[in-house]
Image: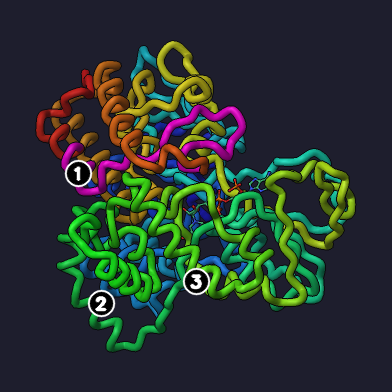
């Protein structure tokens, strides 16, 4: 905190900008590592975060039931064996408080807090072509003059929170899950409404169903889901996964999704019985393995997609039993795995409780928030004391377009991306020199990717690129228009070969009105993407103009 005060004072008292080599926006999984890497190579660098502490996603998403869907031991950083082995997880898919504690541990171990300014939102970043530097301003009026801006703002960090007219008139408590308060929220006995049944809504609903008086869940699109198995870890288990550190460090960066598992089976050569056996076995793992390590064909072949979807529907029907619930909660018009598959624990059973009600808003959408609750288009009202928006994010682009970013000739990233979402490998954008991005569109990110694996690689690439520039006395780096076009064509060719682009979801930007339709994440595979990034670096950053 002392550092924060000093920094704020330096800028405001002296009236002169704070001069840095680099700023990192965000102090989550990517930002912490990016700060560490840039500081290690001797840059004068600070990270800024709107939160009051480190954690990023795991700071903000403290809603009831928030927990990993990734195996904890695969979600860790793999650049330091000591850092990896110094932390022990209590279970396979731990909850948010434990994950947040782990990121505190990382920040402490690497002594990062002295270079992080918390409770500070970056409001604008304007590029000055004459100097090749950025003028950055914060919400407190602080001005920073920096050569590099590295965005580590997160793929899923701009909440879709203002959705309906009348929200300000609601007399009860209204929360977006990604802005859940730190102080406990007492839901006992209350009438609670939840909008959304994505990975977040599922975790909230299954957690609060037995606490609340009455729960009304508003479902627009039913979801496929996989039941989670979450064993607790003994010291022996912890030692066993820690002993696999070298294996993880070698393997994770090269698999298709950055997880431990890879696609191990091909559909065509197997008999129906053998396919069923594979599906049952991967299902039994109780993890995302069923999605990302059963049959890769589910992403390409509608016939395989339908058969695997039917397998999952059958599993869901067996638990729900009730015909009406099956109709409301089991998907029928898109294929399993074509958008993010959540893990759940007792989600479906929550709807068998007498205090839980499901309302379909597919054909009769939510029209407005009233002082007492929600009103649907046909005028039906639902009263509640607490309204929970598990309504997702403006993914990939939102964190950056909510900052006023101006590149060469004053061009606005928000305006550019409102026409077409373009990046070069998700690492830079043509027209925005010395702006580097992690977790950005057109790189492998939250979709089909273990975030820490991907973010580590992107942070390392950016750090290496800056090291190269400094070693060669180069001050400005910007991808060429041709290189960017080439990347987009490559991305589109891969994306359009999959079923993912045929399904409406946040992966395609469909949850944000007016957002250009483009698959936000690169689907060529984490290992293949890394190879392409490494090749660009090895060629002296071909496609990236430096001077
Ligand atoms: P999401 O997947 O975008 O889900 C948002 C939900 O809100 C959807 O059910 C959506 O319905 C609904 N919705 C939005 N606007 C609505 C409206 N006007 N009326 C009715 N329903 C509306 O968001 P999320 O659940 O927060 O998850 C986002 C991503 O975060 C996940 O896919 C995952 O990558 C990540 N996540 C990870 C974890 C984890 O690892 N443990 C946990 C949570 C989230 P439609 O489907 O019809 O749009």
The quadrant in which residue 195 appears is: bottom right
Residue at 34%, 21% in the rendered image: 430
Q: Which residue is mark 3?
A: 95
Residue range highlighted in magenta: 506-532
Q: Does 29 sit above or below residue 99?
A: above
Q: Which residue is mark 2?
A: 241
Q: Are marks 1 and 2 in contact (CB under 8 Å)?
A: no
Q: Are marks 3 and 1 in contact (CB under 8 Å)?
A: no
Q: Which mark is residue 528?
A: 1
Residue placed most toward the observer, 11 or 188: 188
Task: Please state if 376 lies on the left or on the right of 476 as rendered.
Answer: right
Query: Helix, strand, or loop for circle 2?
Result: helix
Q: CA distance from mark 1 to mark 2?
A: 26 Å
Quick one: label 3 or label 1, which is nearer the N terminus? 3
Give percent across and percent down for residue 177. 63, 56
Does residue 512 show up magenta in the picture?
yes
């Amino acid at each position: 905190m002392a550092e924060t005060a000093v920094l704020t004072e330096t800028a405001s008292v002296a009236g002169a900008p704070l001069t840095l080599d680099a700023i990192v926006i965000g102090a989550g999984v990517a930002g912490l590592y990016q700060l560490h890497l840039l500081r290690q190579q001797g840059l004068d660098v600070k990270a800024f975060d709107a939160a009051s502490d480190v954690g990023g996603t795991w700071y903000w998403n403290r809603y009831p039931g928030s927990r990993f869907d990734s195996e904890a031991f695969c979600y860790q950083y793999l650049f330091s064996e000591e850092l990896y082995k110094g932390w022990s997880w209590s279970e396979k898919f731990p909850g948010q408080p434990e994950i947040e504690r782990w990121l505190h541990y990382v920040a402490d171990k690497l002594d990062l807090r002295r270079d992080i300014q918390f409770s500070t939102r970056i409001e604008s970043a304007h590029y000055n072509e004459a100097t090749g530097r950025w003028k950055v301003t914060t919400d407190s009026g602080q001005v920073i003059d920096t050569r590099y801006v590295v965005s580590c703002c997160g793929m899923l960090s701009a909440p879709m929170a203002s959705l309906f007219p009348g929200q300000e008139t609601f007399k009860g408590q209204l929360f977006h899950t990604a802005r859940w308060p730190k102080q406990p929220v007492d839901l006992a006995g209350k009438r609670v409404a939840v909008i959304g049944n994505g990975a977040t809504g599922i975790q909230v609903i299954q957690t609060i169903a037995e606490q609340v008086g009455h729960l009304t869940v508003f479902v627009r699109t039913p979801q496929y889901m996989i039941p989670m198995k979450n064993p607790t870890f003994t010291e022996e288990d912890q030692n066993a996964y820690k002993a696999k550190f070298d294996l993880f460090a070698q393997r994770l960066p090269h698999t298709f999704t950055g997880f431990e598992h890879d696609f191990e089976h091909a559909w065509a050569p197997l008999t129906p019985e053998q396919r069923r056996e594979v599906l049952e076995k991967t299902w039994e793992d109780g993890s995302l393995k069923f999605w990302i390590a059963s049959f890769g064909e589910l992403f390409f072949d509608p016939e395989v997609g339908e058969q695997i979807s039917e397998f999952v529907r059958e599993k869901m029907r067996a638990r729900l039993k009730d015909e009406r619930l099956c109709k409301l909660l089991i998907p029928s018009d898109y294929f399993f795995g074509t958008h993010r598959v959540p893990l759940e624990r007792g989600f479906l059973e929550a709807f068998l409780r007498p205090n839980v009600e499901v309302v379909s808003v597919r054909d009769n959408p939510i029209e407005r928030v009233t002082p007492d609750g929600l009103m649907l288009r046909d005028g039906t009202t639902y009263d509640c004391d607490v309204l929970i928006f598990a309504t997702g994010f403006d993914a990939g682009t939102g964190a950056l377009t909510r900052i006023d970013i101006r590149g060469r000739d004053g061009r606005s990233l928000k305006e550019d991306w409102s026409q077409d979402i373009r990046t070069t490998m998700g690492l830079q954008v043509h027209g925005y020199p010395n702006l580097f991005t992690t977790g950005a569109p057109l790189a492998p990110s939250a979709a089909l990717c273990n975030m820490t694996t991907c973010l580590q690689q992107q942070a390392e690439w950016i750090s290496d690129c800056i090291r190269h520039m400094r070693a060669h006395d180069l001050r400005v780096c910007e991808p060429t228009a041709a290189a960017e076009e080439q990347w987009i064509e490559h991305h589109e060719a891969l994306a359009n070969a999959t079923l993912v682009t045929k399904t409406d979801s946040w992966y395609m930007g469909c949850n944000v009105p007016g957002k250009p339709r483009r698959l936000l994440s690169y689907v060529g595979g984490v290992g293949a993407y890394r190879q392409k990034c490494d090749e660009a670096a090895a060629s002296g950053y071909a496609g990236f103009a430096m001077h």
